[in-house]
Image: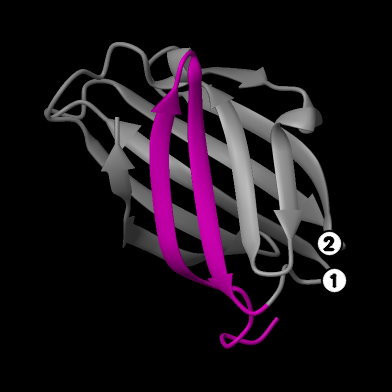
Amino acid sequence: MSTNDALLKHVSIKAQDTTLVATFDIDGNIPGAGAYVVGLVAASPDYSSQRRLGIEFMNGEAIAFYSFSHEQGTEENFDLSGVSHSGNSITGNFPLAAIHGLGKGHIMSAFSEADGREFQSGITVDEAL
C-alpha cells in the first residue's frame, strides 16, 4: 500500500443514546488487498485507563470490530453489523460503554494501520459527546 492510499483526513465521534458513532473519512478508498485498520485510542488524563477501539479490514471487507482495554488486558468483539463503509467513509457504531469511565478531560486520537504496521497515529478527533 502506498502512503497516498487511505490516509485518514477527518475523524469524528458523537454519542447517540448508548452508541458511540465514530466516522473515519479517508483520502482514497479502503485498500482492496491486504490488511487495513482504523480506530481510536482513548485514555484518561493520566493515562491510567486506556482503550483501543478498532475496525479491521482484510481485502476491502470488514472482518473485526473490537475494543481493547489496556489495564484489564481484555478485548471485546462486537457484531460486524455495527460497521458500515462506502467509498471513502467508514462508520463504526461502538457501544458507548467501550469508553465508559474515562470521563471529561479524556484524551482521544485516531490511528490507522496497514498490513500490520502503524500507518498514521495521533490524528485529531472532533468530539460531540
Q: Position of residue 113 (x, y in %)?
A: 58, 60
Q: In 3D space, how far apart are the residues under numbered discs 2 and 1 (Cα atoms)?
A: 4 Å
Give the residue number, with chain letter if any, for mark 1: 32
- Mark 2 and mark 1 residues within 8 Å of each other at the beta carbon: yes
Q: How many marks?
A: 2
Where's residue 32, x and y in %?
85, 71
Crowd rating for badge 2 (residues with CA inside 10 Å; few <14, some 14–19, many 20+): some
Q: Residue at x 71, y 74 (%)?
A: 29
- Name which residue lies at 57% across and 85% down: 3
Above-or-below relation of 48 to 93? above
Q: Is residue 117 visible?
A: no
Position of 24 compared to 46: left or right? right
Viewport quadrant of the C terminus: top left
- Quadrant occupied by the N terminus: bottom right
Q: Label 2 sits on what residue type? A: Gly
Q: Is 16 in the magenta?
A: yes
Q: Left of 5 or right of it: where is 109?
A: left
Which residue position is annotated with label 2? 60
Q: Looking at the image, is 81 positioned above or below residue 89?
A: above
What stretch of residues is rendered in magenta?
Answer: 1-28
